[in-house]
Amino acid sequence: MIKKWLSEDHHIDLPKLFADLGFKLSRQEETHYIFKGGGSHYVVLYSDKGYLYYTIERPEEKLSASDLITAYVSKTEGENKEMLWDKVDAYYKMVLENKSLLLANNSQKPIKLVSEDFNHFRDYGRPLDINADGLYAGSEDMGPFDGRIFQDKEGEILFPLFNIQNEVCGYFADTDKGVLPFRESAIKHSLWYSNIPKKIDGLFLFKDPKEALAFHRKFSLNNVVYLALGAINTQTTRILFQIQRLTKVDKLFLSFTGDKKLEGYLRDLHFISYVEDSDFKLSLTDRNMALHFPIGNEKSFSRFYNHTRQFNTELAQSFMKYNKIIDQNRLNRYSVMVSKDGEQIKVRLPLEANAIRLLVWSYYKNYLDKAIEILKPTSHNWYSEWESTEGQQQKGKEGQWKDYRMAM
């Protein structure tokens, strides 16, 4: 029986092993290497335990050479139907026999020695310039945003992203092209959130932290948490709903926006498809979206159906202003078509702004009213809304945000 299996990791030159396995060196810094491959990034560091690495999605989880080998051979087929550990053992021995993949001596330190809890993302964020102007002026003194806004060495604004273990795994960056992922950030596995007060009255979800800050500048709400998902997917919504359970807040205030209002409605639909227990399914074709969701109680379905029927009627009446004879094929293409499929509702939704707005509003009012409230600015986004009212004296801010509840 082997007593010390896979115990020679400290002799393996991990950067060379990454390169040998086909990973590309993306960047080398004083304290770490960053490799890219298989759709992700890997950060290699040198600690008292020798070379270690982590994925950008989990900086808190340090791995070693044997972990990399295991992950690599798990995706290859062995000869004679070898089991995983047979493949690991064979490859590990092959690496140890290849002197070019081993450290010349244990004292070799090609990069700076760091602690085992090293996370290179922490080095990107620097304190915000006290002379920042515009939207960011004085934001470091705002309770919700203290320690939640930084800048890089070039002065670009950064918002830290957190994974499910509450570890920084990237940043949003406010660039001249919009708010975008910064460098190798794990955008699909993280979210940004403001500081959590002792008492929490609401969770407010936005497209990005800049929108959250603009909203706060306009309304100055107390006892709320602002959030922004790195991307809308299973991983990020899982973190969001975990925060919602921990804070014991029943209702989520949703305010997705974009450069056009349609972008906000599409984000609404995308997010709704991940709401827990909604069983809301969405698929996209070149002309429309197909939606499936449970009928629910008869009252909810009846109101939803009447809303879509009224929309289709008004669409036909508008068409008659320009043509006395209805082109039914053209009209059907832009109508909201609703049908029953057992206990499910099937909806064919055209890719048209008014139709999508109607669907978002009616679904949330009839099926999610107790769980979600949707807020929309009168401008395309909250930053534009804040810009248009900047400098105007506002009274009773806390009550005004309710005037922005989505309505038809």
Image (spheres, rainbow, N blue to C red):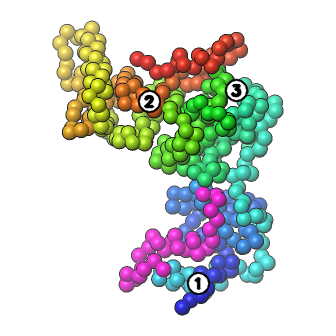
- Residue located 80% across and 35% down the image: 129
* Distance from the alpha carbon under mark 3 to that under mark 1: 57 Å
Q: Looking at the image, tell me whether mark 2 or mark 3 is earlier in sequence order.
A: 3
**Image quarter for residue 271?**
top left
Query: In what element is the residue under mark 2?
Result: loop
Does 329 appear above or below 73?
above
Q: Bounds of the magenta span? A: 58-85
Which of these two is toward me, 148 or 50?
A: 148
Does 392 appear above or below 157?
above
Query: In what element is the residue under mark 1?
Result: loop
Image quarter of the N terminus: bottom right
For disc 3, the marked residue is 135
Query: In what element is the residue under mark 3?
Result: helix
- Residue located 36% across and 26% down the image: 366
* Distance from the alpha carbon under mark 2 to that under mark 1: 55 Å
| Circle 2: residue type | Lys
Q: Residues within 10 Å of mark 1 (few under 14, many from 20)?
A: few
| Circle 3: residue type | Leu
**Image quarter for residue 274?**
top left
Horizontal arrangement in the rendering, residue 108 relative to residue 341 (left or right) = right
User: How far across and down, in percent of the image, does residue 247 sit?
Assistant: 58, 40
The single residue placed furthest to the bottom in the displayed view is 1
| Callouts 2 and 1 close, C-beta under 8 Å | no
For disc 1, the marked residue is 5
Q: Is residue 143 magenta?
A: no
User: How far across and down, in percent of the image, does residue 269 sit?
Assistant: 41, 34
* Distance from the alpha carbon under mark 2 to that under mark 3: 33 Å
The single residue placed furthest to the right in the displayed view is 130
| Circle 1: residue type | Trp
